Amino acid sequence: MIPDADPTLHKDRSMLSTLLNHPPPTHDLRPEKTDYRPTALEGAVRAVTGPVERFVRTQIAGLEKIVPLVEQHAARLEGASDAQLREEASRLGFELRRGGFRPDLVGTVFAVVREVAGRTVGKRHYDVQLMGGWALLKGMIAEMETGEGKTLTATLAATTAALAGVPVHVLTVNDYLTARDAEEMGPVYRALGLSVGCVTHEVPVENRRAQYLNDITYCTNKDIVFDYLRDRLTLGELGGAPLRLRAESLYAREAREKRLLLRGLYYAITDEADSLLIDESRTPLIISGSVVGREEIQFMEAALAFAGGLAIDTDFLIDNNTRQIRITEKGEKRINALVLPPETPWTSTIRKHEMIRRAISALHLFHLDKEYLVRDGKVQIIDVFTGRVMPDRSWEQGLQQLIEIKEGCEVTKQQETVARISYQKFFRRYLHLAGMTGTAKEVTGEFWSVYGLPVVRIRTHRPLRRHYLAGRIFTTMAQKEQHLLERVRVIHGTGQPILIGTGSVAASEKVSGLLSGAGLPHTVLNAKNDHEEAQIVALAGERGAITIATNMAGRGTDIKLAPGVTELNGLHVILTERHEAARIDRQLAGRCARQGDPGSFEAILSLDDALLENGRGGIPEWVARRFALPGSNLWNIMANYAIMHAQKKMERFHGRMRRDLFKNDVQTKKIMSFARGEE
């Protein structure tokens, strides 16, 4: 039998419900929230009352009230020994199991955690971090300015829940941050008698069960979702029959219950919550199995060769906003006339059209060192949100094989879907969900409508000293690059460290070539050298350092300033192109001026940037290019508005994609309501 965090949890089912303020789990084996489908009337009522409820919850949260409840224990705990603090934590755990998350109990736990953190890692929680921890326990999104110590804040809520016997998952966006946070915060938990696990891509699947059995487990969002899907496959048709599964363990040598990785979905704290819960929810996660045979490779090679001979705007059109291919009437006739090799299977007209459409996408929508890179002879996908490689991930429906053929790599076996789930569906199954991020205000409504999570803003510990310089926009890429080179040369001459943000691997290498030609020493951080990330980040705050980075340096990266750099006005960040969401730009700006340190930020852009491709800038871009004199007030207004228009357009498009996927999940639930599961 899979051990629970505490044996009393299932003796009294109402206890867990009290702790989590949520209806009881669906079954004992793997507790999780049951998908809920509101009726049409309930949906209409919620649409009207939802914004009011969200406003009321944030206004009456009373987060500042936790501070005096913590402070009243400070003097007593300062004189306690390490053993006494551990005993106090054990006693509080019993009280939490019996009384739930009462403010007085939580205040005492927070005080103990703060004292232990000061002794073990040399960091005592500030008042604003106490408020953030209380928000996490209340099931909210805590919007905390970048650099305000969200990693340390999470220890408050995680410890409180773990002491209460609730398994905790602390989720973040990549392996680097997961391993770093688990290592840095581990001493705090262990000093209180709690166990800590860490799951990254490098941890073999067979070793993950032991990691998830810890009181608190740090893991990436992708790894935990795929482990959840693996468990669904293991459970099979007995997913909703825990008694039968337990009975199986009496006679089966390899009982399924003993092969499960997770204990259930109890409590998740999501770091960089807007990335995990919003940005990455556009695409479902899929586990695939190899299809027997490789006969379709000839079909794909023929389709790719044929697609290479089609002419854009004549045979097909590309909508770069939606990344969709539309075949013209002339193109349809050419495809219909195509005769494939007789030994090629599955050559029906519909199948042929679908494969050629995907071949066009492989040639024109997916670019080397932007959407993917080639490493060790293999095509590896780059996560557009984080700039990192996603190892062992592949595109479906033949797209992966088409790109491998395009790049001359060994063609892998085609995959078929055996399990899938969206982030929205997965995270809504947690009994208790909370999050923290520095950039939540733009998607406050979506947090509430999809996950029922209100957003509360936490003030900064010290006044923010980030200086925003006036941005510059140029007509051509060449003008932008020349100005960028001049700015870097001037700032580097002062000794101030510089972080240059780019949108892709290719763009980072282009800027690197520009600086190398000017004799400016620098370091590049992108998906090609991700194994050097820790060393590069450690040196990025040194005097005179120049670091070029993709989105890898955008979230969670804490660049420490070397001695004497504060007097040079701290780190200077240069944004070389706007991203498809303004929140990503704000994350890059947040690498400077952290925890009261000085810092500065500027954007150097052009009308040739990728965001403005294919007329996304609309009428303002057209006016700027044709009628305004570069540098004039009219030109500056139109150029700025063109970039803002293009960014908002992409944000709305991605928002529609997420809504469509969410609606599809709901519809699938209705259609498959007769079955035991939909994954």
Image (cartoon, grey):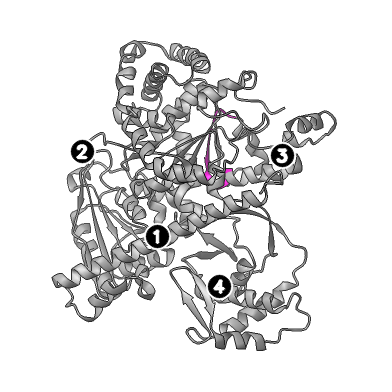
Q: Residues within 10 Å of mark 2 (few under 14, many from 20)?
A: few
Instruction: Indicate the position of residue 374 as horizontal and vertical percent values.
Output: 54, 66
How far apart are the alpha carbons under marks 3 and 2? 52 Å
Kind of residue at badge 2: Pro
Q: Start and end of the magenta stretch?
A: 214-224
Q: Quadrant of the N terminus?
A: top right
Q: Which residue is mark 1?
A: 652
Q: Which residue is mark 3?
A: 239
How far apart are the alpha carbons under marks 1 and 3? 38 Å
Q: Is residue 298 visible?
A: yes
Looking at the image, which is closer to me, 52 or 151?
52
Residue at 49%, 14% in the rendered image: 95
Kind of residue at badge 4: Ala
Residue at 14%, 73% in the rendered image: 632
How far apart are the alpha carbons under marks 1 and 2? 33 Å
The single residue placed furthest to the right in the displayed view is 251
SS category of the residue bearing label 1: helix
